[in-house]
Image (spheres, rainbow, N blue to C red):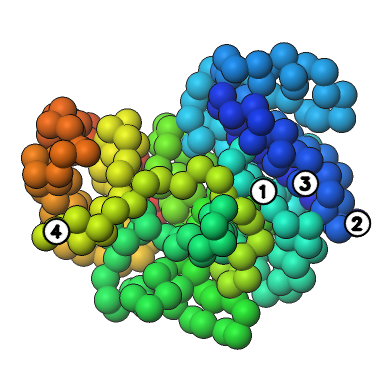
Amino acid sequence: MTDVTAVIVSHNRKEWLIECIDAIKRQSRKVEKIIVVDNDSSDGTREWLGDQLDLDIIYQGNLGGAGGFESGIRAAHENGSTWIWCLDDDVEPIESALDTMLAYSDISKCINTNKIDLDGNVIELGGFMGLLHTNNDFNKVEGNCVQSKSDWSDFRGACFEGMLIHRDVVASTGYPLGDFFIAGDDTLFGLLASLHTKVILVKKPLLIKKGVRKIKNKPFFGTVTFHSNFYLYHVIRNSFVVKNLLVARFNRNQFDLVSKILIYSLKSLMRSIFIKEMPLEQVWIVMRGVRDGIKFSKKYNPNYFLER
């Protein structure tokens, strides 16, 4: 029997979490188990979860999305689940989402899907990998998709917002790196998964995402996505580790990737200085991200990924 466990990571978004769980329970193809990882919520989430007898709850400190999915995927895998369906608390799957994704299980053991926002606009996937991509490796028209079919694409990277993973992939890649906290942990996992299975993106949007970052067009800067200082720091820091994986397993050039990270960091500095919505304190955030990224990359150096 093919059993599916849904893993939801949540932090202080009780109402969205409830809506996400309700949407999972309405699926045309039911899941066998729902695991909720509560990252030390203080908005009543913990109390609400305590009354839910049909959920498996993991309470832990706030370890970020990365630490949450590491705990949740570990629990689902150790419980023997065949498929693990990862969801953030701010996404809501349509009723046919799981059924549709499982239809591709003969093609892939790591299945991703497009998302739409509340206005019905498709949300582009793969933004983190855009920091490190090259024209030879990634197709600009379809982001990180390198092979396009009518309804799915071969996908470089991954997204824990809706990713459906087979237990064999988890056994081969190991659990997500909780040390990432946020930003890039799913990209890293997806790249590792691509060494063991075809990672795909289902083009039909099967998820509605409610928490979307603010994007504006600015003179001289074009389209700008406004990240929190906390998120920007982790994007820069974690990119040094993703870089090591690309060097170790995808034959990418170390100097080229470091240059891309530094250029991205420099652009972030320029935006911090010239765009009012981005306060000057981000200058220090960017510099600290680079500094800590160099240190972080020594822990997860290229040799670390030769064994994954």
Q: What residue would you read off at disc 3?
A: 24
Residue at numbered disc 2: 1
Marked residue nearer the N-terminal end (3 or 2):
2
Q: Residue at x 75, y 67 (%)?
A: 100
At label 3, which amino acid type do we have?
Ile
115 left or right of 276 in image: right
Mark 2 burial class by Cα count in 10 Å: few <14, some 14-19, many 20+: few
Q: Return the residue at label 1.
A: 92
> Any mark on residue 211, and which?
none
**What amino acid is labelled 1 in the image?**
Glu
Inspect this view and state whether residue 133 appears: yes
Q: Nearer the viewer, mark 3 or mark 2?
A: 3
Instruction: State yes or no: discs 1 and 2 in contact (Cβ < 8 Å).
Output: no
Earlier-in-chain disc, 2 versus 4: 2
Q: Distance of mark 1 from mark 3, alpha carbons? A: 8 Å
Q: Which of 218 and 304 is in front in this view?
A: 218
Distance between the alpha carbons at the discs numbered 3 and 2: 20 Å
Q: Mark 4 points at which residue?
A: 219
Q: How crowded is mark 1: few (under 14 residues within 10 Å), some or many (20 or more)?
A: many
Instruction: Give the distance between the C-alpha atoms of the residues marked 3 and 4, in whole angstroms.
Output: 42 Å
